Image (cartoon, rainbow, N blue to C red):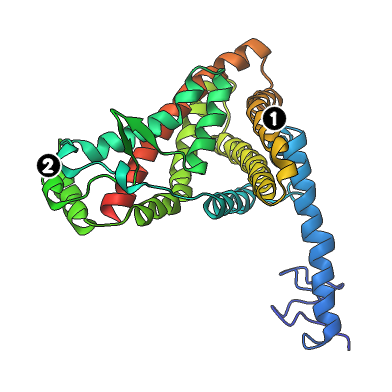
């Protein structure tokens, strides 16, 4: 049965697809043929575009961002959608494969918690996650900080005690000790602490991890602002820097997802265990190379100047990441 108008928007039809809304013309949506046609279309069109985007994203740093602003967008997955899919994937994999092990004997006694215990524990744990990256190359810092943030490496042994974002000594006595420079902030912190007193470590860590993806939506625009200051001339739009960071983080998330899957497989097939360490080394080396190549490709500046700017961006990255992680921990543990 032929149709002259689209059943979805009533626009005149001139082919198998509506020129207004894009809906395909089916004789009936209740036939098995229509269902199989839709499935085949997804496999051969949408997935084909997705896999083409993945290949370009991993193999040619900066090229996907260049293509996007060269108005060749239809053949690739849009930046925000790409980032969302890969961020959900890596955080889901990290959550599914990471255990939160908090020995009861390692929990700090209430009397040993100082006035600034919640803030200190959060800062110290996040600082240690980035500790191994400080002595690396500038772009290597960028990779290790993000990887540790996603993987949830938040433990540190401090003065013979083990601290964790979920074990901040949330008791009514300690809640009364929370202070800040603003009265309204102090009141909010104390009320949140009393509301969450007795919360288990697992619950607290789950809340922190659940808020990490949201934190990145605040963090990335801040980094795009830093990049816009570094690349002031020739002047580029802010959104160009934001898309650049979306693509770079999407590539890192994809590489991390592959490493997490490999680690999970090694737990089932012990023969794959040597590949896990090799994968970690490859990821550590791949990330700084990727950032360097993507900046060179998209911004088109020389090697020396690009390396200097990578150093500045890495320093800003660590500062903003630490601040946003601390705020995420405080919000998740005390205010949510």
Q: Position of residue 218 (x, y in %)?
A: 43, 43
User: Which image quadrant for residue 295?
Assistant: top right
Q: Mark yes or no: residue 25 visible.
A: no
Residue 173 x/y as whole percent? 11, 48
Left or right side of 212 for 161: left
> How many marks do you count on the picture?
2
Front-most of residues 313 and 241: 313
Q: Position of residue 117 (x, y in %)?
A: 22, 37
Question: In this picture, is 190 found above or below 285?
Answer: below
Q: Secondary structure at mark 1?
A: helix
**Residue extending farthest front:** 105
Q: Residue at x 19, y 48 (%)?
A: 189
The residue carrying mark 1 is 282
* Place of residue 158 in the rendered image (x, y in percent of width and height, measured from the top left): 31, 30
Residue 276 in view in this figure: yes
Q: Are marks 2 and 1 in contact (CB under 8 Å)?
A: no
Q: Residue at x 12, y 42 (%)?
A: 177
Q: CA gap, disc 2 to disc 1?
A: 46 Å
* Quadrant containing the N terminus in the rendered view: bottom right
Question: Left or right of 169: which side holds 331?
Answer: right
291 in relation to 38, above or below: above
- Mark 2, secondary structure of its residue: loop
Of the numbered discs 2 and 1, the one sitting upstream in the chain is: 2
The quarter of the picture where the C terminus appears is: bottom left
The image's mark for residue 177 is: 2
Label 2 crowding class (10 Å Cα cut-off): few <14, some 14-19, many 20+? some
Determine the residue positioned at 64% across, 33% down. 280
Q: Nearer the viewer, residue 105 or 296?
A: 105
Taking the view exactly as shown, the residue that stands out farthest to the top is 304
Give the side of residue 70 with respect to residue 120, left or right. right
Q: Residue sitting at 62 percent across and 17 percent down?
A: 306
Q: Quadrant of residue 259?
A: top right
């Amino acid at each position: 049965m032929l149709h002259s108008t689209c059943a979805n928007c009533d626009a005149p039809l001139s082919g198998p697809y509506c020129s207004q809304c894009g809906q395909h013309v089916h004789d009936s949506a209740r036939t098995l043929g229509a269902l199989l046609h839709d499935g085949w279309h997804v496999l051969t069109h949408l997935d084909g575009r997705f896999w083409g985007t993945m290949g370009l994203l991993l193999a040619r740093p900066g090229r996907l961002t260049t293509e996007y602003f060269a108005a060749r967008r239809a053949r690739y997955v849009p930046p925000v959608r790409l980032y969302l899919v890969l961020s959900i994937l890596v955080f889901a994999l990290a959550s599914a494969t990471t255990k939160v092990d908090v020995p009861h004997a390692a929990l700090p006694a209430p009397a040993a918690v100082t006035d600034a215990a919640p803030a200190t524990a959060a800062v110290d744990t996040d600082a240690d996650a980035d500790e191994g990256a400080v002595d690396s190359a500038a772009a290597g810092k960028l990779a290790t900080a993000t990887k540790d943030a996603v993987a949830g490496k938040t433990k540190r042994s401090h003065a013979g005690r083990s601290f964790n974002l979920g074990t901040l000594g949330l008791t009514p006595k300690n809640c009364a000790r929370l202070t800040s420079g603003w009265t309204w902030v102090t009141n909010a912190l104390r009320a949140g602490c009393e509301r969450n007193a007795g919360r288990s470590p697992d619950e607290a860590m789950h809340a922190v991890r659940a808020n990490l993806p949201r934190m990145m939506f605040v963090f990335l625009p801040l980094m795009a602002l830093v990049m816009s200051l570094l690349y002031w001339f020739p002047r580029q739009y802010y959104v160009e820097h934001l898309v650049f960071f979306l693509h770079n983080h999407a590539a890192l998330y994809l590489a991390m997802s592959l490493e997490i899957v490999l680690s999970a497989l090694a737990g089932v097939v012990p023969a794959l265990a040597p590949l896990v360490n090799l994968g970690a080394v490859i990821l550590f080396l791949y990330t700084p190379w990727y950032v360097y190549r993507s900046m060179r490709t998209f911004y088109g500046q020389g090697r020396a100047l690009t390396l200097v700017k990578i150093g500045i961006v890495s320093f800003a990255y660590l500062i903003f990441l630490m601040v946003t992680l601390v705020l995420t921990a405080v919000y998740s543990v005390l205010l949510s």
